[in-house]
Image (tube, rainbow, N blue to C red):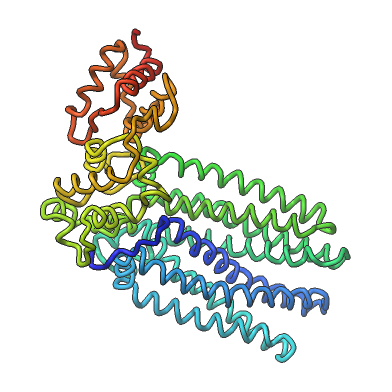
Amino acid sequence: MNYPFWDAGVGYGVLMATIAVVHVFISHFAIGGGLYLVVTETRARRRGATVWLEHLERLSRFFVLTTLVLGALTGVGIWFVIGLLNPAATELLIHNFVWGWAIEWTFFVIEIAAAIVYYYGWRRMSPATHLRVGWLYFAAAWLSLAVINGILSFMLTPGDWLATGSFWDGVLNPTYLPSLVLRTGICVLLAGLYSLAVASRMPASPEKTAIVHYDTVWALVGLAIAAPAGLWTFRALPAALVATARASMPWPMEWLAALGWLALALAAGLVLFGLIFGRHLRLPAAVLLMALAFAGFGSFEFLRESIRKPWIVAGTMYGNGIEVERIAELQSGGLLPALAYRTGDDGRDLFQHACGSCHTVDGYKSMRRVYDGTDAAYIAATIRGAHRMRGNMPPFAGTAAEVDTLAGWIAARIDRRPLAEITGLSGIELGRRSYDLRCGKCHEIGGRNDKTASLDGYTRADLEDFLGMAGDLSDEMPPFHGDDAEREALAEYLLSVTGGAR
């Protein structure tokens, strides 16, 4: 509220993922790659393995270009984006962890300098000195991860920090250790996969086979560390957070099962392409293995971000940058007066500051897709009950008048034609679509808050009468303002799921 809202024109999730996911992949490879290079170089020098050393020099060229150029650019990009997308959360993190950030940046500077020296030192330094530089690089890179992981895991599980405000309680939070082990395993895994991609371009030879087998074992070790650490991390989450996510957002939980299948597929692919047919490994197969790892790692990051909703920092600040302790104050005095920067369009300001961190009008998590076929009264009721709906949304931090202002602003930008005209549906299919639109956001049939049992035995006429008075049941229960065709279709659909008399 102390900052203007930057309208990126796309969903914040898309914008952040575009930069952050790329950076996360690169940064984890940079750490695992540093360990891979020095351990493998030590092994190769002891054996006098010239082909291995040449392979490592080629790998370090790719390694340095990727980590120093793309890694640095996307790292700066993350700071730029978070400062624009959620300046309040960025401010909170900086105020609480300023020395943590300073330490992390110091390690990053050492990491960058050591990586440059390591790459250019292959033919200019003694083997012993070259290895010392490599170990310095890896130590600085991993220590950077150890610090930043404390801040990332804090956002999901702040733990005792909520009561103490202590730096160390924030960093050493309940998921710090398991997520650090998990990320370390991912670092090792990605290093083996990147090296496999480089080795796949070598001509078939006994040396290539040996390198591919070695890289495969390296990747499998990383996977063996990451998989159980992932379960450890999940079990360290507060039970209430998981229970809420299961009830309100079952689809992120489905990604947890997908992670297991992706891990099994990756392990099978490594054994098949790396151990059994390692001599004939080609780049497409190596890229496939890397894609499986990226899909698994991306799923973990998606799950971590999703399960945190509606928070940006669990228990203290919602995703829209509004602190928990200010909700009652804003609901009484209003959100608009609390905004330091206003555009003159009250509806737009309310949407941007209350909803815009997750939703757009026409694009990512579109309001049109949610509200087409409804009206301002329906929209206002859903805003009042936003915290009860699927998706784990925060309560609306504004007055009743601001609810109406926001609802009117959204209603002016949606398609308010009858639902049948918009969708081209009729009969029970129209009824199903109407239920999803008007009822399913709070009452999931066969799932969360299912109320269909209370309608057992209702006739069609009973159901149509019920729809006519639904808005009187609660301020957070939207009135039914659909036309007669939609009303009849919805009643028909409810009959099909409740077994009522026709």
In this rendering, is residue 358 above or below 91? above
Q: Quadrant of residue 371?
A: top left
Q: Is residue 100 in view from this perspective?
A: yes
- The foreground one among 490 and 203 is 490
Residue 73 on image: x %, y %: 52, 74
In this rendering, is residue 272 above or below 424? below
Name the residue rendered at 49%, 74% in the picture: 144
In this rendering, is residue 73 above or below 245? below
Residue 105 on image: x %, y %: 45, 79
Residue 412 on image: x %, y %: 28, 45
Q: Is residue 443 in view from this perspective?
A: no
Residue 471 on image: x %, y %: 20, 29
Q: Is residue 11 left or right of residue 74?
A: left
- The foreground one among 292 and 69 is 69
Q: Quadrant of residue 89?
A: bottom left
Name the residue rendered at 27%, 36% in the picture: 375
Residue sticking out furthest to the right: 205
